[in-house]
Image (cartoon, rainbow, N blue to C red):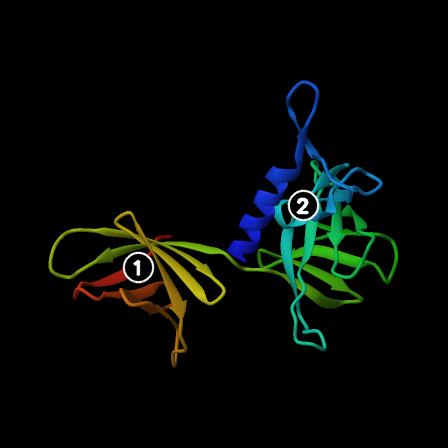
Amino acid sequence: MIKNTIFMAVAALALCGCGQNGTKKTGQATGADRDGHDCIGSAGYQWSEARKDCIRPFEDGVKMLPTTQSDTGAVYAAYIVFSADSAQAELFLPGNEKTEVLDRRDLPGGGHAWNVEDDDTKNVRQADGHWVIEQRGNTIYVQDPYPINVVFDGTDGKTKKLYRIDVVFEPDLARVTLDGTVFDLTQYVTADGFGYKNDMMDLRGKGREATLTMRDGLILSLTERK
C-alpha cells in the first residue's frame, strides 16, 4: 500500500502542469489520457460532481471496505467524497464508471444521512462513529479502520522514567516509534489480543494494555493514553 501511494505521488508530480501565473492547477497535467473534464486518469484523478474538480478519491475520500468478498476473494475499496459544505456525498464504487451523488437529509432523531428519494438508492450515515453505506436496509460497505494511531505510556518497573511509544496499526503491521527510532513489526497470531514483532522487539497486548519486550532486555508495561 505504501509503495502504491509513493508511486502515485511521483506520477502526479511528473505529470502535473501549472497555469500561466505559475500556480498549480488541480488535476491538470501533460498527458494523453485526459477525460472530458481534463482529469488525468493515469495520475489517479477522477472528476467529482460534489467537488466540481478533478480529485484522487483515495486522497480526498473516506475509504470503505465491502462487507462481502468477491468471487475471486479480492477486496475492492469504495470511497465517499463529501462536498465542501457536506450537503452532498458522492460514491466512487468499484466497477462503476459513473459516481452516485446523494443529498444530505436530517434524521428525526438527530444527525444526518445522505441518500435520494428512491428505494434502491444507497444510504450513507454514521453508525457507532464509523461511516457505512447501505442499500435496501443492508450494510454493503463499512469504513476502513486503518490506520489506527495509538500513543502508549510505558514504564520499566525499575525507574521513574516514563516512555512514550507511538504506534500506527495497519493491516498486518504495527509501526512503533520509540526514542525517535521507527520499527516495523509484523503481526502474528495470538490466543487472545494482538501481537506484533521483528528481530528487535515484540509488542503484545489486549485492549488498552500491552507489553513491549526489547531484544536488549528492556521490558515496558504500556497503557494507552485516553
Mark earlier in primary sequence (2, 1): 2
Q: Which mark is residue 43?
A: 2
Q: Is residue 88 left or right of residue 194?
A: right
| Image coordinates for residue 14, horizontal then vertical, percent | 61, 39
Q: Secondary structure at mark 1?
A: strand
Say what amino acid the circle numbered 2 marks. Answer: Ala
Q: Secondary structure at mark 2?
A: helix
Nearer to us in this view, 182 or 154: 182
Q: Residue furthest bottom?
A: 191
Instruction: Find disc 1 in the rendering and name its residue.
Output: 223
| Image coordinates for residue 10, horizontal then vertical, percent | 57, 43
Residue 106 seen in the figure: no
Residue at the image position 17 percent from the left and 60 percent from the top:
156
Residue at the image position 69 percent from the left and 51 percent from the top:
80
Nearer to us in this view, 130 or 79: 79
How would you rate the neighbour count of disc 2 (Cα within 10 Å): few for under 14, some for 14-19, many for 20 or more? many
Say what amino acid the circle numbered 1 marks. Answer: Thr
Residue 193 seen in the figure: yes
